[in-house]
Image (cartoon, rainbow, N blue to C red):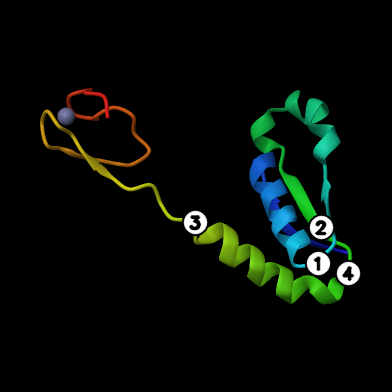
């Protein structure tokens, strides 16, 4: 068994697990049930781990995860209708004049 991926976001981790399952690579999530314990020390320090069962899948699994999770398209930036300022796609409001998207 080998650790293939670490993330604090359980949703991201499970989507990685699903992607591996689609490629017939067996994996399991470690630390998933220790969150209440970790939360006492600060949830931000609680990283979940994805492990693969068969070590020989490692190279394939890591390239699949890298391809699927790191090439996710960034959110497109948008231009404010009021002041024409360009805003990052993750902002719901214009950083300059606070006009909504
Ligand atoms: Zn604006």
| Drawn side of residue 49 relative to residue 89, left or right | right
To which residue does mark 3 refer? Answer: 72
Q: CA distance from mark 1 to mark 2?
A: 14 Å
Q: CA distance from mark 4 to mark 1?
A: 11 Å
| Drawn side of residue 27 relative to residue 71, left or right | right
Packing grade of label 2 (10 A; few <14, some 14-19, many >=20) is many
Find residue 19 and report its horizontal and vertical position in percent.
70, 59
Q: Name the residue: 57% across, 67% down.
A: 67
Q: Name the residue: 74% across, 26% down.
A: 39
Q: Nearer the viewer, mark 3 or mark 4?
A: 3
| Drawn side of residue 27 relative to residue 47, left or right | right
Labels 3 and 2: the sequence-earlier one: 2
Labels 3 and 1: the sequence-earlier one: 1
Secondary structure under badge 3? loop
Secondary structure under badge 4? loop
Q: Nearer the viewer, mark 3 or mark 2?
A: 3
Please say if 92 is above or below 67. Answer: above
Q: CA distance from mark 3 to mark 4?
A: 27 Å
Secondary structure under badge 2? strand
Packing grade of label 4 (10 A; few <14, some 14-19, many >=20) is few
Q: Nearer the viewer, mark 3 or mark 1?
A: 1
Name the mark on residue 51.
2
Labels 1 and 2: the sequence-earlier one: 1
Labels 3 and 4: the sequence-earlier one: 4
Packing grade of label 1 (10 A; few <14, some 14-19, many >=20) is few
Image-quarter location of ligand 1? top left
Q: CA distance from mark 2 to mark 4?
A: 9 Å
Find residue 3 and report its horizontal and vertical position in percent.
79, 60
Name the mark on residue 24.
1
To which residue does mark 4 refer? Answer: 54
Secondary structure under badge 1? loop
Q: Are marks 4 and 1 in contact (CB under 8 Å)?
A: no
């Amino acid at each position: 068994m080998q650790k293939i991926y670490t993330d604090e976001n359980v949703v991201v981790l499970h989507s990685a697990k699903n992607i591996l399952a689609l490629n017939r690579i067996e994996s399991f999530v470690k630390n998933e049930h220790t969150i209440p314990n970790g939360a006492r020390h600060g949830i931000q320090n609680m990283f979940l781990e994805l492990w693969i069962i068969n070590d020989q899948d490692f190279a394939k699994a890591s390239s699949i995860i890298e391809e699927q999770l790191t090439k996710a398209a960034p959110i497109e930036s948008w231009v404010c209708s009021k002041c024409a300022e360009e805003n990052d796609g993750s902002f719901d409001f214009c950083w300059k004049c606070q006009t909504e998207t």
